[in-house]
Image: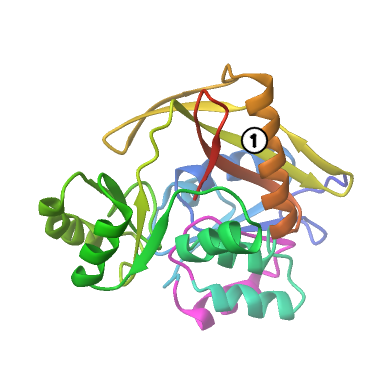
Amino acid sequence: MTFTTTLKEDAIKIMLLGSGELGKEVAIEAQRLGIEVIAVDKYENAPAHLVANRSYAIDMQDEEAILDVIEKEQPSYILPEVEAISISALFEAEKRGFHVIPNAEAVNKTMNRKNIRLFASEALGLLTSDFAFVTSLAGLREASERIGFPCVIKPVMSSSGHGQSIAKTADALSSSWEIAKEARGDASELIVEAFVDFDYEITLLTVRNETGTVFCDAIGHVQKAGDFVLSWQPMQMSPKTLAKAKEIAKTVTDGLGGRGIFGVEFFCQRRRRVFLRT
């Protein structure tokens, strides 16, 4: 790896498109490696703004606004950190020769539940829960009756559980429809999923680089009512279940391509069934 010094002409520069708490941690670690950090978000004084070398507050869904900042700063790497962002700006940045981590198409798939679910289920043939996409309350009622209760209802584009709910009966669907409007992103379309009765859930950090794919120890999670409670590493799980998770994670990350760290999430059952969580 080549190390440089920040604020010098030859500095390696990373631009964060999204500057929340995760972006702040990335910025701190990048600066420890001598990487210059430019933090961009939709509001002033976002967490990563406070530790970056320079910061900008722009409309994150405005293609030209994003491209103007990219052209001004000429970053070595562009790292998208939020879902509500102009994907077209990332494709255009790649056309102009900028390096999007891991690549613009991977971001396009992973930041939208519809794109990643269809990619995983149809293109890669991986095991997921039964699902349907709906754009109206009537469609939600029809899909949930077919899939069955309880079912999970999520906006196709959101984060941190915003807009997500579990409908245990048909009587809860009107409430779920209203909750979906709280999405951080696009709530014009929802995904309805069969509820998976899992024993535990994990995240498998999967690293793709020029030498191949490596895996970090599995991270276990506990959530209550959709809210994060705690995580720990390593998660104790059977070798066969871990091997299956690694196999699926490699299939997904190879399909997405590019280099970087991917967080691949799973619902696991003790009888060794592993569901990709998208």
Provide the residue designation for mark 1. 245
In the displayed structure image, the side of residue 225 where residue 6 appears, left or right: right
On screen, residue 167 above or below 228: below
Is residue 223 on the magenta stretch? no
Is residue 62 on the magenta stretch? yes
Q: Tell me if residue 16 can be seen.
A: no
Horizontal and vertical percent position of residue 194: 36, 48
**Residue 123 or residue 226, whichever sits in front:** 123
* Label 1: which secondary element: helix
Amino acid identity at mark 1? Ala
Q: Write down the quadrant of residue 39 in the picture.
A: bottom right
Q: Write down the quadrant of residue 116 in the picture.
A: bottom right
On screen, residue 11 above or below 222: below
**Residue 185 or residue 277, whichever sits in front:** 277
Horizontal and vertical percent position of residue 15: 62, 60
In the displayed structure image, the side of residue 269 where residue 165 appears, left or right: left
What are the residue bounds of the magenta stretch?
61-85
